Amino acid sequence: MKIARFEWRSGVQWGIVEGETIYALDGDLYGKFSQGKKLCQLPDVRLLAPCEPRNGVACGRNYMDHIKEMGWPVPEEPNLFFKPVNTVIGPEDNIVHPAISTDLRYEAELCFVMKKKARNLSEEEAMDYILGYTCGNDVSAIDWFIKSEGLDLIRTKGCDTAGPLGPWLVTDIDPHNVAIKGRVNGETRQDSHTSLMIFSVPTLLRHITAFMTLYPGDVVWTGTPKGGASPIKVGDVIEVDIEGIGVLRNELVAPK
């Protein structure tokens, strides 16, 4: 099932996507819901980020091919950081190049959105707390990462518009068995597979909820594979393409 958040007829709502048609979502998004009447077609709406998070938590260094590419040691536990909510934008929204950075990079990632309040989860129960999966682009000001020797993740990862998500949530994929690609202006720069994740989705949830509460709508970023942290410049169109979900597309524009 594909679940979309969208702007239509001057309002924002959630719906269920089948082909090019959007149907009403009847019920509680974070509880029980069903497919309702036909509303409109995809070209009639503006798709928004498929979440309304309080928190965004991300895992770095989580793909074995990326670890080998960079020559890093394999981490013994998830390397976590916050991806703040001011970064969140939707599909086709513009990423605004932060004026503070001269070296901006993109990172294709699989993300998931929570459907229930979660604290101290076990790995066995973790998957029941997920609403769905989406594409994410962890845009990063790498110059601030280098200047701070990896300590200033707020400026590296937290600039406005630096967290595109979309185009919708998919509820029925295996997050550990899908292809993930990143493209810039049509050129494939990342071509990998989520089976190469070091820490699985349940493992990430167990670690995160051991120290903080996640709420319905919160987003977890699962890391980027080989070829991540690829440079981008103003005018570039960046695409994150994940098997079974779709394509998240955004253009990088200059700050006003």
Image (tube, rainbow, N blue to C red):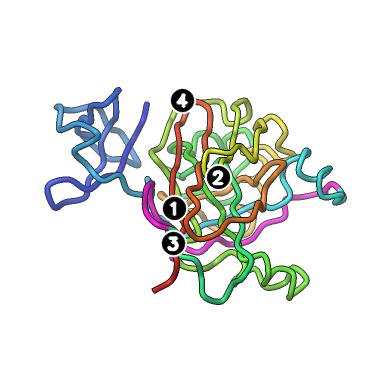
Name the side, left or right, on which 98 lies relative to 21: right
Residues at marks 3 and 1 touching, judged by CB atoms closer than 8 Å: yes
Distance between the alpha carbons at the discs numbered 3 and 1: 6 Å
Distance between the alpha carbons at the discs numbered 1 and 2: 10 Å
**How far across and down, in percent of the image, does residue 94 sit?**
40, 57
Residues at marks 2 and 4 touching, judged by CB atoms closer than 8 Å: no
Using the image as rendered, state which of residue 225 and residue 129 is in the foreground. Answer: 225
* Residue beneath the point at 22% across and 45% down: 13
**How far across and down, in percent of the image, does residue 212 sit?**
58, 59
Decide: few, some or many residues near mark 2? Use Cα within 10 Å; few <14, some 14-19, many ≥20: many
Which-is-in-front pick, marks 1 and 4?
Answer: 1
Distance between the alpha carbons at the discs numbered 2 and 3: 14 Å
Q: Which residue is mark 2?
A: 184
Using the image as rendered, state which of residue 244 and residue 52 is in the foreground. Answer: 244
Q: Residue furthest left?
A: 9
Position of the N terminus by quadrant: top left
Distance between the alpha carbons at the discs numbered 1 and 4: 29 Å
| Tag shown at residue 226 | none
Q: Is residue 84 magenta?
A: yes
- 169 w.r.t. 156: above or below: above
Distance between the alpha carbons at the discs numbered 2 and 4: 28 Å
Range of magenta residues: 74-94
Tag 3 secondary structure = strand
**How far across and down, in percent of the image, does residue 143 sit?**
68, 69
Type of the residue with mark 3: Val
Distance between the alpha carbons at the discs numbered 3 and 4: 34 Å
Mark found first going from the N terminus, 2 or 3: 2
Name the side, left or right, on which 201 lies relative to 98: right
Q: Which residue is mark 3?
A: 253
**How far across and down, in percent of the image, does residue 209 sit?**
59, 52
Q: Which residue is mark 4?
A: 172
Determine the image quadrant of residue 18.
top left
